[in-house]
Structure formats: structure tokens, C-alpha cells
Image (cartoon, rainbow, N blue to C red):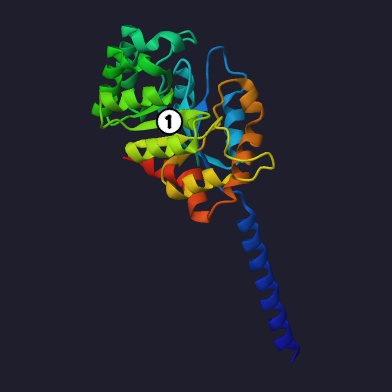
Amino acid sequence: MLRALTRTGAVCVLALAAFACSGARAAEPIEIFDAHLHYNFEPKPFYQPDEVLALFRKHRVTGILATSRPNTGTHVLFEGSHEGLQIVPFLRPYRVRPDMQTWFKDPTIFELVQDEFKRGYYRGIGEFHLHGKDAESEWVKKIVDFAVANDLYLHAHSDAEAVEILMRHNPRARIIWAHTGFGLPTERVAAMLTRYPKLWGELSYRGGIVDGAGKLTAEWRALFERYPDRFLLGSDTWISERWASYGEIMAGYRGWLEQLPPDVAAKIAHGNARAMFAER
């Protein structure tokens, strides 16, 4: 009898332990792929590589789309040690900050893109800033065609007009739309996603997704559920202050991801990026 009770007790203990472990796993925050990250080297970065990697581990960021100005920061992250972290390097068409205003009409930038691409590991070009009819430049078209020819994504910080011009340059272009139009109405975003099947929306700095109480708005819920495969998350760490608030940025995403169906949340949090940037 005592032996039977002992066995029963042991089974109960094991069952409770399994339940506790299962509960701990369930409570683990959803993993996030940060699809808009800058590790700028102009000036020298305030956060060192080991500090940046520690932030990713702490906040369960398991993948990043890495860019920098100049591309030195991307080299440091991608070529360094990063076990357990998928790093997807994008080539940025900037050497210094003023290039943001002129790159689209500067032939030397196209030379930079061609030379930097020879490193052999880039998966895209951007993030670049481009608005309105500036996108009609012959050098922009050359870069779009270069991206298509080399199976690269484009990461565009642009208004809707510029995105449409990029698509006209080459209908085979694949574009990640940084900030998804900022304050563009959801109806317009939906129209763009419908018209351009190779357009994805990245949501850093995108307003209107939640209300003042942190509740996901009905318009954005409907958009996410209609296009679950077309959205990505990003931190946009363009200044040191964004690194300092990195945990808050990720917590903000998780706050509204929890309000979505789990399969939709998983796609937006990391699944879409994993599918786009699968090993090749």
C-alpha cells in the first residue's frame, strides 16, 4: 500500500512538474524578427556589438534585417558571432547622412551598390528614403533593375506615389514598405497590397494601429486578418535613443499581437520574415 501511494505521489509530482514547465513555455513571449534595424557607424556606435546581441537575447528577437550607414555596421554584425540569431544583411545606398537627400540622382551611389554587392551575402537594398517623383530618376531605375536581376528586396521609406513608381520601373520588384505609409488610411494601404502582390508593409513608427488604451483598432485588425502574410515588424534603431527603448518597442508590438488570432500574430511577429528570407 505504501509502495502504491509512493508511486502515485511520484506520478503526481511528475505531472505537476510537466504542467509547470508547460505553463512556463506558454508564458514565454512570442519571438520577433526585427525587420527594420540600423546599426549605424556614423558616428561610431554608442552600443557595442555584444550589447546589441544581448538586447536581442533579452527581448527574444531571433532574427534581424540589418542595415547601417555606412555599411560597416552591417559587416560587423553579419561577419561576427551570432549563434541563435538570423541576420539578413541589406545594402544601404548611403555613405554619410547627407546621401539621404541626393542618392537617387548620384551615379556614384550605383557604383557603391555594385561594389558592395560583391561581398556576396546581401539579400536586399535599403532602407532608402525616396519620395514622389524623385523615384523617376534613371539611377533609381538602374538600382531597381539591379535588385530584380540579383534577387534582392528593396526596403523603401517612401510615400505611395514613389512606391508605385518603383513598381512601374520593374513589375518584378519586391518591396518592403518602411512604416507602411505612416498615416495613410487603412483603405489606401489595403488597395496598395491588393494591387501589388510583391509589396510588404513594415510597421515601425506606424501610427493608428492601437487606440489610446493600447487596444488594436478594428481597421487594423481587419487589415491584419485579411493580409496576414504581408506585414513585418521593426525597431528602426536609427538613433541611440531607439536602442535605449528597444525593450519598450518590442513590448508594444507584443501588446497588440496578443489581441490577434495566434496564427496571424505568429506570421507578423516572425513567420513572414522567415519565409521571405529562408536560406537559399
Q: Secondary structure at mark 1?
A: strand
Q: Residue 275 location, x and y as percent? A: 38, 44
Horizontal side of 14 relative to 206 (left or right) equals right
Q: Nearer the viewer, residue 188 or 150?
A: 188
> Which quadrant of the structure image shows residue 50?
top right
Horizontal side of 49 relative to 244 (left or right) equals left
Q: Quadrant of the N terminus?
A: bottom right
Q: Does residue 168 lie above or below 267 as drawn?
A: above
Q: Residue furthest right?
A: 2
Q: Nearer the viewer, residue 68 or 193?
A: 193
Q: Is residue 277 visible?
A: no
Q: Residue 192 location, x and y as percent? A: 38, 35
* Three-letter code, disc 1: Trp
> Which quadrant of the structure image shows residue 110?
top left
The residue wearing badge 1 is 177
Q: Quadrant of the C terminus?
A: top left
